[in-house]
Image: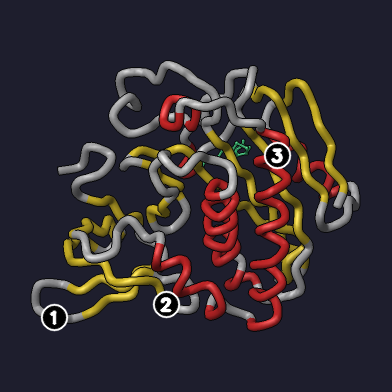
């Protein structure tokens, strides 16, 4: 594993993509202290000030079909949650996962993951998993203050981001090995569901084909969220975004 650290980058995902296109190996990690144009999901920005947060991107060159790549985001979410277990004190809230890949503690987001893929002749050329973790104490703007928090505020302790990164990469290696062997999430499905903040809660599925609500069950071994509608029909949600009532201020 090669770790390249920078003081400032536009976005670690962008640099990882450039490195990938220049032939960098799978396992390359790009880390920055600050990003000038950090990218979030759905075209949003990821505010990335300097001085203690963790922003990194892991480049992978997996040898499986492109439709499997979205599962890697769930593998990384579980790896982050597991790594946080070993870092935060016992009095700190348990790291949970909001499907598919936000890490939440005490109902607020502390980590976001953005996975991007490059194809060559319809096969995967590279996958980049970008991870942003709110580590140090910070002020969130009015739009985020009810939804986001940081580890130091939550846990009242100093968090070493190098150690956190190390633990995430170690956990990822273990889960990724299981994932590539089995070709799906079977080996970690139970653990993932055990951290799923949505489990048993009412969710609103923002499906392009129409919004609906239901009760979230767990994930399938391919990472879809099972949602039981009021008529008892269970829908497996793949691409739609799920918002959860009761956390993030969604009521
Ligand atoms: C989300 O919207 O929840 C995903 C946020 C992902 C942010 C990380 S920070 C490191 C990497 N580089 C980026 O530009 N984005 C990801």
Q: Give x and y (percent) for residue 213.
A: 17, 62
Residue drawn at 42 percent across, 54 percent down: 97
Residue drawn at 60 percent across, 43 percent down: 131
Count residues near mark 2 (Cα–Cα under 10 Å), then give few for <14, some for 14-19, many for 20+: some
Q: Is 36 left, or right, of 246 in this rendering?
A: right
Count residues near mark 3 (Cα–Cα under 10 Å), then give few for <14, some for 14-19, many for 20+: few
The nearer-to-camera label among 3 and 1 is 3
Query: Residue pushed farthest left?
Result: 231
Q: Which residue has dot 3 on it?
A: 163
Mark-to-mark CA distance, 3 and 2: 32 Å
Mark-to-mark CA distance, 3 and 1: 45 Å
Q: Nearer the viewer, residue 98 or 170?
A: 170
Residue drawn at 55 percent across, 30 percent down: 135
Q: Do tag 3 and tag 2 residues touch (Cβ < 8 Å)?
A: no
Q: Which residue has dot 2 on it?
A: 220
N-term-proximal mark, 3 vs 2: 3
Q: Can residue 174 be seen by looking at this rendering? A: yes
Badge 3 marks a residue whose secondary structure is: helix
Q: Which residue has dot 1 on it?
A: 232
Residue drawn at 41 percent across, 39 percent down: 91
- Compared to 229, does 208 lie above or below? above
N-term-proximal mark, 3 vs 1: 3
């Amino acid at each position: 594993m090669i770790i390249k650290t920078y003081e400032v980058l536009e976005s670690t995902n962008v640099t990882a993509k450039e490195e990938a296109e220049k032939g960098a190996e799978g396992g390359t990690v790009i880390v920055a202290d600050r990003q000038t144009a950090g990218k979030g999901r759905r075209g949003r920005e990821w505010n990335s000030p300097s001085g203690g947060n963790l922003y990194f991107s892991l480049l992978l060159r997996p040898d499986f079909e492109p439709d499997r790549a979205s599962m890697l985001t769930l593998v990384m979410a579980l790896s982050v949650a597991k790594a946080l277990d070993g870092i935060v004190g016992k009095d700190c809230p348990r790291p949970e996962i909001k499907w598919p890949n936000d890490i939440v503690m005490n109902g607020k987001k502390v980590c976001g993951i953005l996975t991007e893929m490059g194809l060559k002749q319809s096969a995967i050329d590279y996958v980049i998993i970008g991870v942003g973790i709110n580590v140090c104490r910070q002020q969130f703007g009015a739009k985020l203050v009810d939804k986001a928090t940081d580890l130091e505020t939550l846990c009242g302790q100093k968090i070493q981001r190098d150690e956190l990164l190390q633990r995430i990469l170690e956990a990822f290696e273990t889960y990724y090995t299981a994932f590539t062997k089995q070709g799906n999430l079977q080996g970690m499905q139970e653990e993932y569901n055990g951290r799923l903040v949505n489990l048993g809660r009412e969710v609103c599925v923002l499906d392009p084909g129409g919004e609906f609500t239901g009760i979230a069950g767990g994930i399938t071994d391919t990472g879809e969220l099972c949602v039981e509608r009021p008529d008892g029909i269970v829908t497996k949600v793949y691409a739609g975004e799920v918002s959860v009532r009761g956390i993030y201020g969604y009521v």
